[in-house]
Image (tube, grey):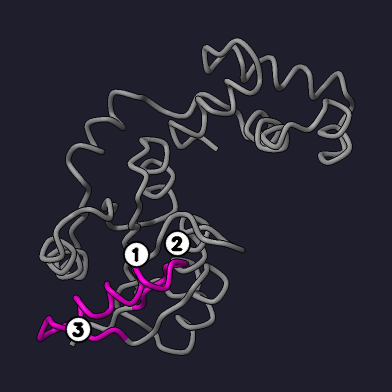
Amino acid sequence: MIRVLLAEDQGMVRGALATLLGLEEDIEVVGEAADGEEALVVAERTRPDVALLDIEMPRRNGIDTAAELRRTLPDCRVIILTTFGRPGYLRSAMEAGASAFLVKDSPARELAAAIRRVLAGERVIDPALAAAALSAGPNPLSPREREALTAAADGSTIGDVARKLHLSEGTVRNYLSAAIRKTGARNRIEAVRAAQRQGWL
């Protein structure tokens, strides 16, 4: 029996996935979680073979949860499920140690097949997303530029961002200017949107 952990913040989606996987003779859902922090606690208790993680969850996202799971339970394979087929997310997920990356509108039989395949040591990636990731190239933003853009995403002023990040206003301006240039945007709001679309933040 393949032991599966489901981490998804939308209860209805989580319940539907659990029901669909429960129809498979060789798959058992041994734990469910509504966010990344809870997923780590449940994983420690249930020791799943495979963890299905939504990418956008409260408290800890799927990519950070995947990296922590790979560290604490190295035998647990991780499948990232997402509504958002963003190239940067795929790259980040693979760097975090995920074995598979699938969009949520994939047929249920593909999810069950992916669970079996990752347990056999394969990597499973949505083909359209893989092609998009290859054409998009790597994330051009440095960690500090990403941090500054993320801090500015809510409309914060340069001063607010500087205080949040404990940096000088001049340094923040430099990071934001570099991010605007690299994303091909006209201002930081456009830069935030462009980076989010690509999954770079």
Tell me which label, 2 or 3, sits earlier in the chain.
3
Counting other residues with Cα less than 10 Å from the Cα at mark 3, is it few (<14), some (14-19), or many (20 or more)? few
What's the magenta region?
A: 5-29
The residue at 18%/82% (across/down) is 27
Please tell me in which quadrant of the rendered image residue 176 appears.
top right
**Is residue 9 shown left or right of residue 4?**
right
User: Which residue type carries mark 2?
Assistant: Ala
Q: Position of residue 57 (x, y in %)?
A: 51, 60
Q: Please name whichever residue, 199 or 123, is drawn nearer the observer in this view of the structure.
A: 199
Q: Please name whichever residue, 2 or 72, is drawn nearer the observer in this view of the structure.
A: 2
Please tell me in which quadrant of the rendered image residue 112 appears.
bottom left
Residue to which mark 3 is pinned: 22
User: Which residue type carries mark 3?
Assistant: Gly
Tell me which label, 2 or 1, sits earlier in the chain.
2
Q: Secondary structure at mark 3?
A: helix
Instruction: Quarter of the image for the C terminus: give it.
Output: top right
Q: Nearer the viewer, mark 3 or mark 1?
A: 3
Residue to which mark 2 is pinned: 66
In this rendering, is residue 17 above or below 88? below
Counting other residues with Cα less than 10 Å from the Cα at mark 2, is it few (<14), some (14-19), or many (20 or more)? many
Tell me which label, 3 or 1, sits earlier in the chain.
3
| Residue 78, numbered label | 1
Q: Please name whichever residue, 163 or 167, is drawn nearer the observer in this view of the structure.
A: 163
Counting other residues with Cα less than 10 Å from the Cα at mark 1, is it few (<14), some (14-19), or many (20 or more)? many
